[in-house]
Amino acid sequence: MNVGIIGCGTMGSGIAQVAATANCKVVVYDVNEQALEKSKIALQRILARLVEKGRINQDKSESISSLIIYSADLNDFSDAELIIEAIVENPDIKKSVFQNLESIVSSNCIIASNTSSLSITSLAACLKKPERFIGVHFFNPAPLMKLVEIIPAIQTDAAVLKATRDEIDRWGKTTVQVKDTPGFIVNKVARPFYGEALRIYEEGIADCATIDWAMKTLGGFRMGPFELMDFIGNDVNYTVTETVFKAFYYDSRYKPAFAQKRLSEAGYLGRKSGRGYYNYAEGAVNPSANEDEVLARTILNRVLVMLINEAADTLYLNIANAKDIDLAMCYGVNYPKGLLAWADEIGIQSCVEQLDKLYHEYHEERYRCCPLLRKMSKSNSNFF
């Protein structure tokens, strides 16, 4: 397949590598020729490391390189069958590019966006043929992360959905189909991992190190929420939370935390700035965790039940099916197990009781139990 990639940043370059590895002919477009050269050099370094580690042989490395063309001319997309946009999260800029693109590509070319937060339906509406448009959301780094969320717009033709998903599956990815909803699956369901951890921190129940220790040691998560926010960047993570909060009409379940806003304002962005919830300066001494297992279990249960509630809500609103929700959280953010399967393991009745206890304690809507969980509790049913 002839594939076009718009944008040669980390994500665009990564998607190009994935496509070329699957033997697609790829054109990577960017208006910045210096950025294109930088992307080309970076790919050569990546491929050299893969050869060195024995992940691919030299012939495959050369094949991947030969399949990718770098261009500053949008007209080089004239033969493309699938184009994936991966540029700045600005709807006006994206729409302008899509409208210019539509006059160049064939009538059968599928146009996709890698957006993580914008409405696919809104982006599709700018085209003369909106039925050709679809969301294809990769996770960073694209060559390593298995998950791709496939998001049809209201206008998307069923044949476009099938062709897109089949092709991304052929690239070796695990695809999940998602309704066009703010945050899709992963960025919606994952909000409590950060939000409830921040709430526990703001209440003074535990510090960052203790919360991270609890989630990793007892929960089996690869990174604690504060380590992960520092890794992502507090500016980026806060913006995603704020975007989802606004998009869901200010539902308190997604309410951002002042603690994170203040860090972002101070420039304490995490690893990339040298300081966030932790200090990454050479020789810096960070606080040790309070390894009290009773406290740790309280922290884990509170965050976990909020995650389960969000996953259940995602199923309740028909955003995705149960299997895809659990796959998305395992492969998109490396959770130790699917949240709905985890709910079955804990017991649906126990989840409902924990949520009701939080609601009665705080009387805040953020702790309201998903109707699906309550119905399942009454009927003594499970997700799987």
Image (tube, grey):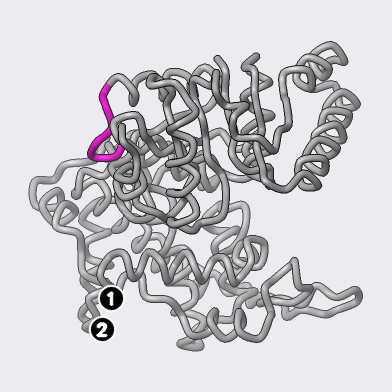
Question: Quick check: marks 1 and 2 in contact, CB under 8 Å?
Answer: yes
Find out whether residue 146 is within the magenta segment: no
Where is 151 relative to 197, above or below?
above
Which quadrant holds residue 326?
Answer: top left
Q: Which residue is mark 2?
A: 361
Amino acid under disc 1: Leu
Between residues 265 and 156, which one lies in front from this camera angle? 156
Which residue sits at x=21%, y=69%? Answer: 368
Majority SS type along the magenta span: loop
Q: Quadrant of the N terminus?
A: top right
Q: Which residue is mark 1?
A: 358
Q: Where does residue 374 sit, x and y in percent of width and height?
A: 14, 57
Which residue sits at x=69%, y=38%? Answer: 72
Between residues 128 and 160, which one lies in front from this camera angle? 128
- Element at label 1: helix
For this orientation, the residue located farthest to the top is 59
Instruction: Tell me the CA gap for discs 1 and 2.
Output: 5 Å
Left or right placement of residue 290 versus residue 202 in this view: right
Q: Where does residue 340 sit, x and y in percent of width and height?
A: 33, 45
Q: Quadrant of the C terminus?
A: top left
Which quadrant holds residue 252?
Answer: bottom left
Where is 314 relative to 299, above or below?
above
Q: Where does residue 165 sit, x and y in percent of width and height?
A: 41, 24
- Element at label 2: helix
Which residue sits at x=41%, y=66%? Answer: 243
Q: Within 10 angstroms of label 1, few (less than 14), some, or many (20 or more) residues?
A: some
Left or right placement of residue 71 versus residue 364 in this view: right
Q: Which residues are magenta?
A: 153-158
Which residue sits at x=59%, y=62%? Answer: 224
Q: Within 10 angstroms of label 2, few (less than 14), some, or many (20 or more) residues?
A: few
The numbered mark at residue 113 is none
Amino acid under disc 2: Glu
